[in-house]
Amino acid sequence: MQNSSDDSFYGLGIAPDLLKKLDSLKFTVPTPIQHKSIPIAITGEDVVGIAQTGTGKTLAFTIPLIQRMAAMKKGGLILCPTRELALQVNETVKMLGQSFGLKSTVVIGGDSINRQISELKKKPHVIVATPGRLLDHMQKKTVDLSDVGILIMDEADRMLDMGFEPQIRKVLAALPKERQTMLFSATMPAKISKIAQTYMKKPLRVEIARAGTTAEQIEQELFVVPRNQKLALLQQLLLEYKGTVLVFSRTKYGAKKITRVVNKMGHKAAEIHSNRTLAQRKMALEGFRSGKYRVLIATDIAARGIDVDEIEVVINYDLPDNSEDYVHRIGRTGRAGHTGKAISFACPEQGKDVNAIENLINLSIPILPLPKDLPEPPPPPPRSFSPRGGGGRGPRGGGGGYRGKSGRGGRSGGRRR
């Protein structure tokens, strides 16, 4: 017999049939964000939920969505920043909604727009969409949003980081004013607060951790490494850690190069970035999840769309352009109560970038000494031209040590083996 204590979904206001469905799917213990937000959302209140990645936000809004839609007979709209996340969210909606006769469809870029038009004509109960493609359908008048009674914005901060604010505002302006809105995010920048004030009705804020906080179960480490020694360091780490490894590159061209080199090292690797088709990205993610690929190399486009349990290590081969993306990247490990590891590479001139990350997460990341047996970088190619002007600029970075961090030591001794 289930009880109504904090370690159960019972007592959160969830309908009996939905509780039975959760039991059948082995969802028995709510996470903190689920425990706090579900009772509020089920009553129809607007909710702003702030929690770090990997804490179960998808189920926190899907359960109220399914229950309220069954009672309201209204439509639901879920906005997501990336194709991968939209597909992932739709799987959860289908998993919970099928037993209640609720149908959903995904509206994302990279997929056939004609197929999407055909699906939209069937009047799905829930639309899971990326803002850009949804706006395309709105302009073509192939989607009807007039009966949307529940709007969910998932990973709202990421949508704004990706430049979707104009599209989001157009979508919000087109929706019925009488609706419930739920906004979930890992961080709460000023732009999100402004959207909440403008388009939500006295939302109740549920915050599980300070915005920018990283999961406690993730061990974080940092190497200060010259750019031309990164691949050698990556090779050593891939030999040291035997589980699944997620590697983040700042650019799609870098991701392609890293993938090629890692495969040559003898590791099965795949890549996810904006130059890959939706089918290629799905195959890469499914292969990583199934074990076909041990290493996945991704750009930030995938930082919040990779839902794979028990990733052993996340490696930031390049630091992110936006320090808040660091939180979302490393949140791919240490999920659902598991421990995780996050290792970052910083070039000697990137002290300010590391400082910005540490200020955001309110934590000093330990700096480790480079392995003693790391191969020396190859010599620079000979110059085939004379420098312009007089004297030249010298090497990038100026050879000055790690600015901003020169006084802090790493662990003594060599690298753990």
Image (cartoon, rainbow, N blue to C red):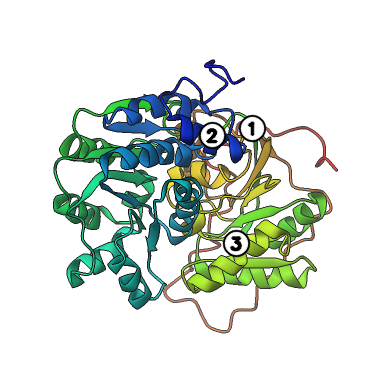
* Residue 310 picture quarter: top right
Q: Nearer the viewer, residue 125 or 140?
A: 125
**Residue 355 visible to an observer of this rendering:** no
Pointers 1 and 2 in contact (CB under 8 A)? no
Q: Which circle, 1 or 2, is nearer the viewer? A: 2
**Amino acid at the residue labelled 1:** Gly
Among the two numbered marks 3 and 2 on one chain, the one whose residue lies closer to the N terminus = 2
Among the two numbered marks 1 and 3 on one chain, the one whose residue lies closer to the N terminus = 3
Residue 118: x and y in percent read 33, 73
* Residue 25 picture quarter: top right
For disc 1, the marked residue is 337
Residue 354: x and y in percent read 52, 41
Q: Residue at x 27, y 31 (%)?
A: 44
For disc 2, the marked residue is 20
Describe residue 104's horizontal placement relative to residue 365 as left or right. left
**Amino acid at the residue labelled 3:** Leu
